[in-house]
Image: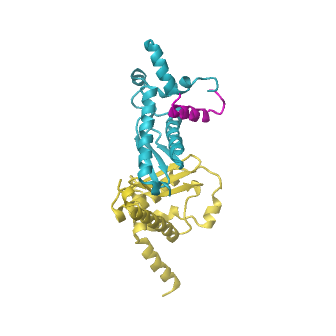
Chain colours: A yellow, B cyan
Amino acid sequence: MTETAAATAENEGLLQSAFVVEMVRQMRAIDPYGHYDSMSTTEILEPFILTKEKKREIPIIGDPDELVVARVKVFFNAISAMIESECGLMAVPLVNLTHEGFGRALITVGKLVVMDRTLRDVHRFGFPSLSKMKDEGDKILSIALGLIGEHSKVAGL
Amino acid sequence: MTETAAATAENEGLLQSAFVVEMVRQMRAIDPYGHYDSMSTTEILEPFILTKEKKREIPIIGDPDELVVARVKVFFNAISAMIESECGLMAVPLVNLTHEGFGRALITVGKLVVMDRTLRDVHRFGFPSLSKMKDEGDKILSIALGLIGEHSKVAGL
């Protein structure tokens, strides 16, 4: 197998992973006019990928536009949906941003806060690669599920 | 004692209650130019009081302006400060509103959600009287402290 073929095969697995599938589902959910209908998974998730070069082109200080805020919400919605499907309890995401792109993202299950993040420079929101994005999502998911297992009484409130 | 004197005495007690004192402190905190310096407690808290007659004058549908949103935050900040002074743990308020005045208000202590409210028609935010406002604040406070006592481990996370 050549290097490219190996990379493609790896990418295939990545694109079929539960988290990436959920991300695509969430992106399609905010697309009422069907702009994404003819697009592939990679194309739909392309705006989430911010390589170092691309990041450097974005000014350090800037206000996030609606599209990037929508993407931030998609990311945390996808994690919430994953939590929900894993533990059967409703997970509620909450993204609170100032117009300058600073704020807080929370996911609650019952009365338990399973994720609490400070958001900064949201206009530069993105991940170095698709697999890094999946890693980040999986990390938050596993911490959340750990907390729910430990404090199931509070999560069930 | 005449009726008015009794009412005044009652009001005095109300104005010196911990919750009302905290509300005034929070209102003064968002007053960088000192507009409230020469105002009495009753005058500072006057915008929170929305009698039935006053409420009727406000249209049912409307967007909340900055001032009313600031007052909503003051109310939940005051409750958070009370929780903090009662239990010694940091309470973090979070008010998330759409521009239409719908949203959610949360207070978290550690990983415990001690208050979770749906907000509606925020442009008509107010209480029938000062004592009703204090009752509401005290109710939220006692529920929150009950939850913290019951789930102190999660609140301490």
Visible in this render: residue B66? no
Q: Residue at x 50, y 54 (%)?
A: B110
- Across and down, in percent, residue B94 comes to 50, 46
Q: Position of residue B25 (x, y in %)?
A: 58, 34
Q: Is residue B42 above or below residue A16?
A: above
Q: Residue furthest bottom?
A: A1
Q: Is residue B93 visible?
A: yes
Residue in the picture at 48% in, 49% down: B108
Q: Position of residue A146 (x, y in %)?
A: 43, 66
> Could you say which quadrant of the image residue B3 lies in?
top left
Q: Quadrant of residue B85?
A: top right
Check the picture and name the quadrant holding the N terminus of chain B.
top left
As rendered, which of B25 and A72 lies closer to the eye? B25
| Number of residue marks | 0
Residue B51: x percent and y percent? 42, 23
Q: Nearer the viewer, residue B118 or B36?
A: B36
* Snapshot quadrant of residue A86: bottom left
Comparing B8 with B91, the one in front is B8
| Above or below: residue A53 compared with residue A98 | below
Magenta segment includes B17: yes
Left or right: where A24 falls relative to B67: left
Q: Residue furthest top?
A: B2
Residue ranking furthest to the front: B1
What's the residue at 49%, 43% (across, down)? Answer: B95
Residue B9 counted in the magenta span? no
Q: Main secondary structure of the magenta part?
A: helix
Going 43% across and 40% down the picture, which residue do you hit? B140
Q: Which residues are magenta?
A: B16-35
